[in-house]
Image (spheres, helix red, strand yellow):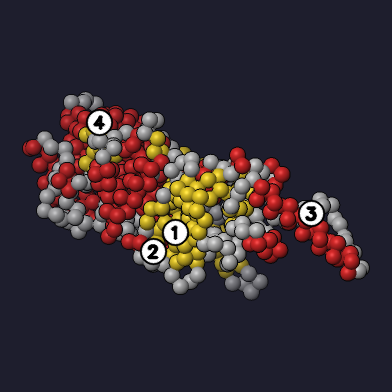
Amino acid sequence: VFVALRRRVASSMSMVFDEYGRPFIILKEQQGSSRVKGVEAQKQNIMAARSVSGILRTSLGPKGMDKMLVSPDGDVTVTNDGATILEKMHVEHQVARLLVELSASQDDEIGDGTTGVVVLAGALLEQAEKLLDRGLHPVRIAEGFEVACSIATRRLEEIAETVDASSDTFLVDTAMTTLSSKIVNMYKKQMATIAVEAVLAVADTARGDVNFDLIKVEGKPGGSLDQTELIRGIVVDKDFSHPQMPKKVTDARMCILTCPFEPPKPKTKHKLDIASKEAYDKLYKREQEYFLEMVDHCKKCGANLVICQWGFDDEANHLLLQHDLPAVRWVGGVELELIAIATGGRIVPRFAELDASKLGRAGVVREVTFGTTKERMLVVEECAESQAVTVLVRGGNKMIVDEAKRSLHDAMCVVRNLVKDNRIVYGGGAAEVACSLAVATAADDMTGTQQFAVRAFADALDDVPMALAENSGLAPIAHLSAVKAAQLSTGLSHLGIDCLQLGTNDMKHQHVFETLIGKQQQLMLATQVVKMILKIDDVIMHGNY
């Protein structure tokens, strides 16, 4: 045996001598390690994906922890939003990246539940690994998970309750559930009310849809979170171009321009020699005529406010002030489009095309100032055509403002989901426990190896309430067992984990609601990704085959 071992070691390395006669060993490249096949590949993939879900597990629930992410440039982000954490982590592993895409899919489709979906996928993979160790074929496990997922989604529909989407109370309560795990949970009532009012202001109830383009979220560091407000209009992070222009324009008729207040420039290279005072005066007079013509076009069409995408020099600025025409310059393209939609104006590319029919109309355009820093913003209110709104977020620093904006986005997505489908399930792990019990009962009636996979799905569903209890500082197994026993004995599907320790595990009493479509999407997306990972049995790296 010893001789055979020595031969194997000798075959993988060779000894050479340098010019001074000193020996050193060269090991041959382990080419076999660059390719992984079969069960080994599946287990490595499961381990990589589970390591990602393990990072997010501690961020689940109202008592979940935040993560600090530092970019290569030194930018710091503090968040517990699953999609943001995974996006900024820059995951390298190919299979682990599937969980990043899973979280992004949940964020794009539903807007909330991005942490829960990754935790559920991690729990399913943990159960799948146990089944692989027991000799079950990966395809049989994937099929069993698919069957269990359909049982769970049907159970969710059975326990769902329909709420009145026109009632602000239910919408605010559901938005508050989303915000309870965020950094803004101290002001969750105020934030939830702002989110509900913003969505209802632009909601198309006939089609059951919400155009998020009409909701603008602006952030301004300084002040505190409770100074966040909803402005029924558009906020533009600009000020009037001249300090002596009026700070408030009532009954605004605005021309929205994408052409600059400058004399036209030739397309070709040019050079102008001015040899005398008369030639300079002539040039100055011609330039004045250009500016006066531009201002005249604006005045003739009846405008009393100019909004321009480009800049203009001091000469044009001075002439606009002289002609009592307040102006705003360097307004971004997206903001320009939003102003045009909201005020009913047309974006005009040439001064010659200006006329009264292309003007946008608003009740008031005013300039507001913040603190002592001389930072100013323009507010366009009482817009003629649409109910565009802006949420102005305040916070102690940029990190808090950014996290508050992400939290408000999640809350608004939840309210939009309720406008689209007004059915809710109860949070706090109640829905997962109800689904787990239903799947486990169905598994008892099955035969063959499929029942193992279906029962494993039920065990994976229990992992979400266990994580909630763990993150809240409770004994996870004891609390989960108590909730399952209570649901079995009473038949009530709204009993969950009392994360906030209010003395009752009745989620209906605690007003912890989640949208049905969000919960169903979580189950379906997690199951699809786990099926995909289980069916990979060979990892071939580029150039190593």
Earlier along the polypeptide chain: callout 2 or callout 4?
Answer: 4
Q: In this view, does 485 lie above or below 239?
A: above
- Cα gap from disc 4 to disc 3, whole angstroms: 65 Å
Q: Please name the residue that numbered disc 2 is placed on.
A: 395
Quarter-wise, where is residue 65 in the image?
Answer: bottom left
Q: Please name the residue that numbered disc 1 is placed on.
A: 219
Q: Tell us which disc is closer to us: 3 or 1.
A: 3
Label disc, if present, on residue 265 of the rendered structure: 3
Secondary structure of the residue carrying numbered label 1? strand
Q: Tell us which disc is closer to us: 2 or 4.
A: 2
Q: Position of residue 538 (x, y in %)?
A: 46, 39
Q: Where is residue 535 in the image (x, y as percent from the top left)?
A: 41, 35
* Of the pair 292 and 230, the residue shown nearer to us: 292
- Cα gap from disc 3 to disc 1, whole angstroms: 38 Å
Secondary structure of the residue carrying numbered label 4? helix
- Cα gap from disc 2 to disc 3, whole angstroms: 45 Å
Pointers 2 and 3 in contact (CB under 8 A)? no
Q: Position of residue 323 (x, y in %)?
A: 65, 58
Earlier along the polypeptide chain: callout 2 or callout 3?
Answer: 3
Label disc, if present, on residue 424 of the rendered structure: none
The residue depicted at 46 percent of the width and 73 percent of the height is 372
Q: In this view, does 330 lie to the left or right of 528?
A: right
Q: Please name the residue that numbered disc 4 is placed on.
A: 157
Earlier along the polypeptide chain: callout 4 or callout 3?
Answer: 4
Q: In which quarter of the image is the C terminus?
A: top right
Q: In this view, does 517 lie to the left or right of 105?
A: left
Earlier along the polypeptide chain: callout 3 or callout 1?
Answer: 1
- Cα gap from disc 1 to disc 4, whole angstroms: 38 Å
